[in-house]
Amino acid sequence: MPKSFFIHTIGCQMNVYDSERMAAALCACGYTAAFSWGDADLVIVNTCSVRAKAEQKAFSLLGRLESAIRRRPGMIVGVAGCVAQQEGARLLARAPYVDLVIGTRAVQRLVDLVRRAEAGERPIVDVDLAAPAADILEPPPAQTSGGISRFVTIMRGCDNFCAYCVVPHVRGRETSRRPEAILAEVRGAVADGAREITLLGQNVNSYGAKEGLCSFAELLTRVNAVEGLARIRFTTSHPKDLTRELIGAFGRLGRLCPHIHLPVQSGSDRILERMNRRYTRAHYLDIISKLRDSCDQIAVTTDMIVGFPGETRAEFEATLDLMRQVQFDSLFAFIYSDRPKAPSTLLPDKVPFTEKRERLQELLRLQDTITRRKNAALVGTVQEVMAEGFSKRQAAGDEGDSSAQWTGRTPGNKVVNFDVDGAPAGSVDIRPGRLVPVRIERVLAHSLRGVRDGGTATDRPEREADHAA
């Protein structure tokens, strides 16, 4: 009987991608996927340590896993990702039942590590960040998850060393994949049914610079030419490396979605300098203006950190003022927390937690007002939505209901649940991956509601570019 595995993923899209690679590698060597960790012979927790909360979540999960180990003697338990890289052998002191500590650049060696554990060599700690680039970035095995949307990593690591960030310490220095390998993976995903590709990297804007490869804008142009692909997204961008060529791509490339996630972190120049972000508020605002000149429909989302060491009330107000100027479509906001090896841990003038929490709530209230206003402006418009599947409401009900409700996203990455009046849920007119014209009728807290417009769902692989770059 084949052995089974279960992977629990915490954190960013990069971790999701790495979990897919691990799953594919395990399937290729004879393992099968289990429905829960209680049924698995091998359990891997893929972790994140960028925020203290994510790290706490990982150790809480490992604590709950201990009882499952007692019920299933012989289970192999692995911890992968950033917490594994950060803690190394120290992790075993907190969780002595862990058999494998799999660093961020040990994913490629997973099968060998598992085979050694099966043979009784436990525990094993592999957190070598000095692995050759070819080993780290070798194209992964065929993906097993399917689906219309796929992640493709184009680079790993980071050279920016922002004062608050552990990524360079747990993911290593920046290394880009060859464009030929990326394009081969994209074409393979499209041949397997993918319609939307998200290109991943800690800072995609600096893709290829160290290795003398093509620029990121040139890579996007090549991906845009892949037949059968409907949409391209990417994350994450660093403002200091956002080139004029890349800004122009939003007006030039028909398959590139009009959405950019551009973390700003603070609206205060002094705080940005302390964070080692290497741009100013004025520079960031200038980038936003150029992006909207290139594509007036572009949706802009961001990250914010509240309560960075030394942040005064006036500097927090500068962040709120920046939000009012930019009018972000949405944002992710975080309370600052000290992270191991991050230089900001040593900074004085820490902001009290109660003050940080109050600032976070104030910031989120402001963004909620902005998001609702921007979404309300879409009511009455027709948006092109890529159907992903039945909405949660429909999935919980009768799939044969004549008023089937589907869910999907606009090019600007807004979630839309839409009704298909008079069409059975199994209608061939709509299926995952199809582009559906949807008339927006209502704004909800975290999504939009609409109804399919009179047009026909289509497999059209690209939209017309708004204008030339």
Image (cartoon, helix red, strand yellow):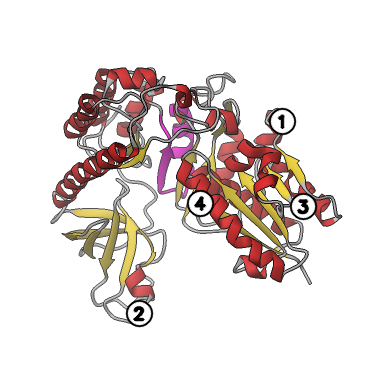
Q: Is residue 187 visible?
A: no
- Mark 2 — residue? 397
Give the crowd class for mark 3: few <14, some 14-19, many >=20 residues within 10 Å: many
- Mark 1 — residue? 131
- Mark 4 — residue? 57
- Under mark 2, the amino acid is Gly
Which label sits on residue 114?
A: 3
Cα–Cα gap, marks 3 and 4 = 24 Å
| Helix, strand or loop for disc 3 | helix
* Residue 250 coordinates in the image, percent (x, y): 32, 33
Circles 1 and 4, Cβ within 8 Å, touching? The answer is no
Cα–Cα gap, marks 1 and 3 = 18 Å
Cα–Cα gap, marks 1 and 2 = 50 Å
- Under mark 4, the amino acid is Lys
In this picture, residue 418 sits left or right of residue 12: left
Image: 84 above or below 218 = below
Residue at image position (41%, 19%) is 276
- Under mark 3, the amino acid is Val
Residue with the most extreme right position: 119
In primary-sequence order, the first of circles 4 and 2 is 4
Magenta-span inclusion, residue 246: no
| Helix, strand or loop for disc 1 | loop
* Residue 275 coordinates in the image, percent (x, y): 39, 22
Cα–Cα gap, marks 4 and 2 = 32 Å
Q: Nearer the viewer, residue 333 or 221?
A: 333
User: Which of the two discs, 4 and 2, sits closer to the camera?
Assistant: 4
Residue at image position (28%, 58%) is 416
In primary-sequence order, the first of circles 3 and 4 is 4
Q: Nearer the viewer, residue 249 or 162?
A: 162
- The stretch of residues the image draws in magenta is 216-237
Image: 49 above or below 408 = above
In primary-sequence order, the first of circles 1 and 2 is 1
